[in-house]
Amino acid sequence: MNLLRPRYADGDRIDIGGAIVRLKINPRSRRIILRVDAKTREGVAVAPSARRIGEAAAFAKTRRGWLIARLAALAEPTEILSSAASRDLRREALGCFGERMAAHCAKLGARTPRLSITDTRSRWGSCAPARPGRPAWIRLSWRLMLAPEAVADYVVAHECAHLIEANHGPRFWSLVRGLVGDEKPHRAWLRAHGAGLHRM
């Protein structure tokens, strides 16, 4: 047994030639994954178990060039100029998204849920369908106010469709398309520009 072999743990950070990589265990992952976290501006090496976390670290070391290039390509973080502007966007989002949510729910034949505007940096929205003793609730990121109107409306429709279908199966996507048409352009826009909005 090699007693000098490095031992890694969930949450450890390693320096790979100037690129910082955070090690993470995710039991839902089926394989080793390497990605870049735009918010923390570091690499993330994901292992499906603690037993394979060393393998994730080793894989990250083989991709140093890719990591350096991806991290260098990240734009500098952007900030809202004032807290007042952020509060105004939240108020505007509540009214704008509330109207669209009500329209989509009416088309779906669903009761309009409660709406809250959040400051999450990892999700555009979430939906909690009604349960006994708990009303339905939709949460949406205020950053959607900075996206094209059609893209923001797609996210609202997406969460409203979850009131009917909790999964992302064929029936769910059929409901979404019935509300906003082809969802692919909107999803592509979020993939291309979403990280920039999350840095705000």
Image (spheres, grey):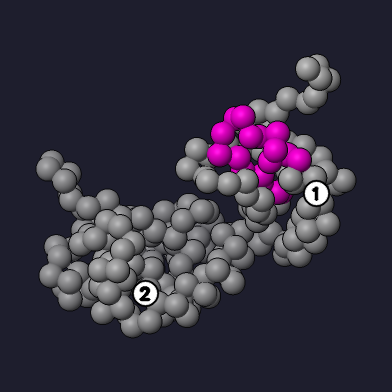
Residue ID at (49%, 64%): 143
Question: x, y percentage for residue 124?
Answer: 44, 60
Q: In this view of the protein, which residue sits in the foreground, 74 or 5?
A: 5
Which quadrant holds residue 67? Answer: bottom right
Residue 68 vs 57, above or below: the answer is below
Spatial CA distance of label 1 from label 2 is: 41 Å
Residue ID at (78%, 58%): 66
Query: What span is in magenta?
Result: 42-58
Question: x, y percentage for residue 6?
Answer: 78, 26
Residue 62 image label:
1
| Residue at the front extreme of this rendering | 1
Q: Is residue 66 visible?
A: yes
Tell me which amino acid carries mark 2.
Answer: Asp
Asked if residue 90 lies in the magenta stretch, the reply is: no
Question: x, y percentage for residue 107?
Answer: 17, 76
Q: Quadrant of the C terminus?
A: bottom right
Residue 13 vs 65, above or below: the answer is above
Residue ID at (65%, 53%): 35
Secondary structure under tag 2 reads: helix
Residue 153 image label:
2
Q: Is residue 81 visible?
A: no
Asked if residue 54 lies in the magenta stretch, the reply is: yes
Tell me which amino acid carries mark 1.
Answer: Thr
Q: Quadrant of the N terminus?
A: top right
Q: Earlier in the sequence, mark 1 or mark 2?
A: 1
- Drawn side of residue 68 relative to residue 167, left or right: right
Q: In this view of the protein, which residue sits in the foreground, 33 or 67?
A: 33
Secondary structure under tag 1 reads: helix
